[in-house]
Image (tube, rainbow, N blue to C red):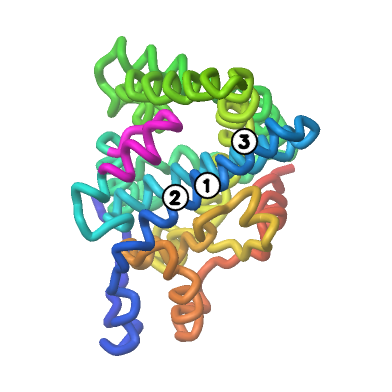
């Protein structure tokens, strides 16, 4: 099992240049989690007060649900808090569980992805290997996401399969992150429904939490997966090409790629650098000769055109 190629910080930076990327602020991770839930809360309130805004609120909330998954991913790398127990509490109960995931199950899965990135043993290879596809195929995938079919498959069918087989390692990513986390997911979502009911807006749980979770969240998760690894030539042999970075405009950061998730090439180069330092790391790496080898896309539309270029 050959591991993916690796780069050491000393291959690119002096100790002084690298020092800013090693420090972690204890308050930033909790602040990001609070920000994510704050945006969700404001969007729910806006949808309740002005129902015509519900379609826009669904997109905002679905993107922040992806934000919770991204912050769970940050917790996998210990990035939410220097205190390991607090890091895992935030990453599991406030980020993973509400969207049907499990930090404990996701961590070994994801670290295996880093160890074998784009190698045959990479558990995420199934997400990028099929691309490029035809535009018709990509359109079908997005329609399945936006109509709730992907949600049903991952949150219902995969969960039943996981419980039946008791062998999560044999299943796709959907079951790995949801199979044994059904009970906590139902517990937290029951609490959300109860809170909405006590507030006199029971319907808001379905229209402004469950609907985004079943539609927009799977769609932007798919776009994230495509942008990160699909159609990157030489990704299995060159550490600088193990992933793609996508330059995201303000609207893409608001509706597709929150919390610097678009800087994925940098994350694969140095996975312990906190997510909020990735823009600075991007500039630092691109300032080195080796940085010219990185795959950098000019926006998510450019990535989708490349990923759907198959005739």
Lateral position of residue 106 relative to residue 219, left or right = left
**Count of all numbered marks drawn on residues in the image:** 3
Circle on res. 58: none
Magenta-span inclusion, residue 174: no
Q: In terms of secondary structure, what is the magenta stretch mainly?
A: helix
Q: CA distance from mark 3 to mark 2?
A: 15 Å
Circle on res. 34: 2
Magenta-span inclusion, residue 99: yes
Q: Quadrant of residue 184?
A: top left
Where residue 183 sits in the image (x, y, percent)?
A: 33, 18
Q: CA distance from mark 1 to mark 3?
A: 10 Å
The residue depicted at 32 percent of the width and 50 percent of the height is 75
* Residue that mark 3 sits on: 44
Residue 197 seen anywhere in this rendered image of the structure: yes
Lateral position of residue 309 relative to residue 206, left or right = right
Magenta-tinted stretch: 89-103
The residue depicted at 32 percent of the width and 33 percent of the height is 102
* Residue that mark 1 sits on: 38
Q: Residues within 10 Å of mark 1 (few under 14, many from 20)?
A: few
Q: Secondary structure at mark 1?
A: helix
């Amino acid at each position: 099992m050959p591991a993916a190629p690796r780069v050491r910080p000393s291959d690119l930076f002096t100790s002084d240049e690298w020092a800013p990327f090693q420090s972690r602020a204890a308050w930033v991770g909790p602040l990001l989690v609070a920000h994510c839930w704050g945006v969700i809360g404001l969007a729910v309130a806006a949808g309740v007060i002005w129902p015509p805004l519900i379609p826009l609120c669904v997109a905002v909330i679905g993107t922040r649900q992806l934000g919770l998954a991204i912050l769970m991913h940050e917790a996998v790398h210990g990035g939410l808090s220097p205190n390991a127990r607090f890091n895992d509490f935030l990453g599991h109960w406030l980020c993973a569980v509400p969207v049907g995931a499990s930090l404990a199950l996701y961590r070994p899965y994801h670290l295996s992805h880093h160890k074998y990135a784009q190698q045959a043993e990479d558990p995420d290879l199934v997400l990028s290997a099929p691309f490029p596809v035809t535009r018709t195929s990509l359109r079908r995938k997005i329609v399945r996401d936006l109509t709730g079919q992907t949600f049903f498959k991952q949150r219902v069918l995969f969960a039943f399969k996981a419980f039946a087989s008791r062998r999560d390692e044999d299943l796709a990513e959907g079951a790995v992150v949801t199979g044994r986390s059904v009970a906590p997911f139902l517990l937290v979502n029951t609490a959300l429904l109860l809170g909405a009911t006590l507030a006199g807006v029971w319907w808001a749980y379905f229209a402004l939490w469950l609907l985004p979770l079943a539609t927009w969240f799977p769609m932007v998760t798919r776009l994230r997966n495509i942008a990160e690894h699909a159609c990157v030539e030489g990704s299995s042999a060159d550490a600088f090409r193990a992933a793609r970075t996508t330059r995201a405009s303000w609207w893409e950061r608001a509706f597709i790629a929150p919390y610097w998730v678009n800087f994925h090439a940098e994350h694969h180069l140095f996975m312990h650098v906190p997510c909020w330092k990735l823009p600075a790391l991007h500039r630092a790496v691109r300032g080195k000769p080796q940085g010219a080898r990185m795959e950098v896309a000019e926006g998510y539309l450019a990535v989708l055109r490349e990923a759907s270029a198959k005739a």
